[in-house]
Image (cartoon, grey):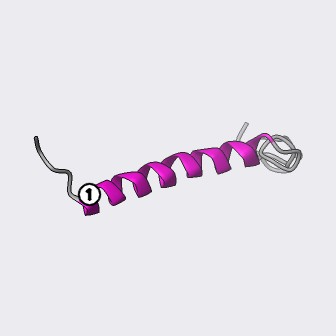
Amino acid sequence: MTAIDPGALAMAVFGFVFLFGGLAVTLWIAFQSGGYGDGQSVDDDQGGEGDE
């Protein structure tokens, strides 16, 4: 049986926590009232000069 290096195990655990923690924070911000959907988007037509 192959032994698992404790350092490699620690890096793997930290990597998964970092990956899924970042995903959870991103989704939490996205679905809050102050998230991505509430602000003014760069696609909103504000009048003025455009390229259309």
Q: Quadrant of the N terminus?
A: top left
Q: Is residue 23 left or right of residue 31?
A: left
Amino acid residing under circle 1: Ala
Note whether 43 is above or below 48 in the view shown.
above
Query: Magenta span covers which residues?
Result: 6-31
Give SS at disc 1: helix
Query: At 20% across and 57% down in the image, what residue appears?
Result: 5
x%, y% of residue 4? Answer: 20, 51
Query: At 75% across and 49% down in the image, what residue appears?
Result: 29
Q: Which residue is mark 1?
A: 8
Q: Is residue 6 left or right of residue 39?
A: left
Note whether 1 is above or below 4 in the view shown.
above
Within 10 Å of disc 1 (Cα), the crowding (few <14, some 14-19, many 20+) is few
Front residue of this view, candidates 51 and 29: 29
x%, y% of residue 50? Answer: 76, 45
x%, y% of residue 28? Answer: 73, 45
x%, y% of residue 19? Answer: 49, 49
Residue 17 included in the magenta stretch of the image: yes
Front residue of this view, candidates 36 and 51: 36
Residue 13 included in the magenta stretch of the image: yes
Residue extending farthest to the front is 1
